């Protein structure tokens, strides 16, 4: 079939071609396929396409893939997709990728997804992405990820995110972060979280921060913590807070310091509390201060 040109074939003729024919087609011949012709390919025909043949399809032809056809593609074929082809994929097409196929994505291919395409990634597919692939996400792509998608990221994937990527998490996605994911966030990553994101984190999520991660919280972020958030802190976390961090807490947040938490405050931490913060402390809280905390 070396001399065959797809330009002379109708869709019914393309659909009737045997798999052996597709095995013999050159990349140049495949490049001549139209979106309508691609749209009639059978499962058997698609399965015999090599990565080079897939990569030879025009972006217009790739747009002709139905979601059912996309679901047939395997990882080796995915590796053949070029950036321009991936950028042309719709949200629905991206949503049709199988978890097995997603293993073939390179970080550059992930980065080539449009924001609509990134939004189409299923949680199951996101859960298969390794740290190298996750690192390929652009900030605009991270910003459109939903809570289920973010929650599906592996802890290794989360740990490998750049600060800029973490800073792109949306307020809508933040509740999806699991305690395991929060626990692996570094100081720099935590510091990159938007105040709006910190504001919507639950007490369990705040309580899951490692002491190293907690050190990354800045004054603006600490300023949105509620008394419930503070109440959910562990003694280890409170001990790790610097004086400047404690002084950034609102007076209502300070009320969340239970007797067990107040008891572990050091003298430097107590000295850093502002007069308005000290003024709201109850007699029970004051009475719980350690002897070494009051000088």
Image: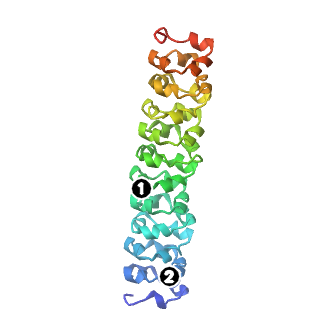
Circle nearer the viewer, 2 or 1: 1
- Specify the quadrant of the image occupied by residue 156: top left
Q: Is residue 7 above or below residue 138?
A: below
* Percent position of residue 35, x then y: 52, 79
Q: Quadrant of the N terminus?
A: bottom left
Residues at badges 2 and 1 in contact (C-beta under 8 Å)? Answer: no
Q: How many marks?
A: 2
Q: Which residue sits at x=39%, y=70%? A: 51
In percent of the image, x 58 and y 19: which residue is there? Answer: 258
Determine crowd level at label 1: few under 14, some 14-19, many 20+ residues with C-alpha closer than 10 A: many
Disc 2 marks which residue? 34
Residue 164 position (above or below residue 221): below
Q: Is residue 279 above or below residue 72?
A: above
- Between the C-alphas of marks 2 and 1, the distance is 30 Å
Of residue 264 and residue 12, the one placed in the foreground of this image is 264
Colour pattern: rainbow
- Identify the element where label 1 is drawn: loop
Image position, residue 119 (x, y; %): 55, 58
Question: Where residue 111 sits: x, y (%)?
Answer: 43, 59
Q: Can residue 209 be seen at all in this image of the molecule? A: yes
Res 215 quadrant in image: top left
* Residue hosting label 1: 136
Q: Is residue 168 left or right of residue 199?
A: left
């Amino acid at each position: 079939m070396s001399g065959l040109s797809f330009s002379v074939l109708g869709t019914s003729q393309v659909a009737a071609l045997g798999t052996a024919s597709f095995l013999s087609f050159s990349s140049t011949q495949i490049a001549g396929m139209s979106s309508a012709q691609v749209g009639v390919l059978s499962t058997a025909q698609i399965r015999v396409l090599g990565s080079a043949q897939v990569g030879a399809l025009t972006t217009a032809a790739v747009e002709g893939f139905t979601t059912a056809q996309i679901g047939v593609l395997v990882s080796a074929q995915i590796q053949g997709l070029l950036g321009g082809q991936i950028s042309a994929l719709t949200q629905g097409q991206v949503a049709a990728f199988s978890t097995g196929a997603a293993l073939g994505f390179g970080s550059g291919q992930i980065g080539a997804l449009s924001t609509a395409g990134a939004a189409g990634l299923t949680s199951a597919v996101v859960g298969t992405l390794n740290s190298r692939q996750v690192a390929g996400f652009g900030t605009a792509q991270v910003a459109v990820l939903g809570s289920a998608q973010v929650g599906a990221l592996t802890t290794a994937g989360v740990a490998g995110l750049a600060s800029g990527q973490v800073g792109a998490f949306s307020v809508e996605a933040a509740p999806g972060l699991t305690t395991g994911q929060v626990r692996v966030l570094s100081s720099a990553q935590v510091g990159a979280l938007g105040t709006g994101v910190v504001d919507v984190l639950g007490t369990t999520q705040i309580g899951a921060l490692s002491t190293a991660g907690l050190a990354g919280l800045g004054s603006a972020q600490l300023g949105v913590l509620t008394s419930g958030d503070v109440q959910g802190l562990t003694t280890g976390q409170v001990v790790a807070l610097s004086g400047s961090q404690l002084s950034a807490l609102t007076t209502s947040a300070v009320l969340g310091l239970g007797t067990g938490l107040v008891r572990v405050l050091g003298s430097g931490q107590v000295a850093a509390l502002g007069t308005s913060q000290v003024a709201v402390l109850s007699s029970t809280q004051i009475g719980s201060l350690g002897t070494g905390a009051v000088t």
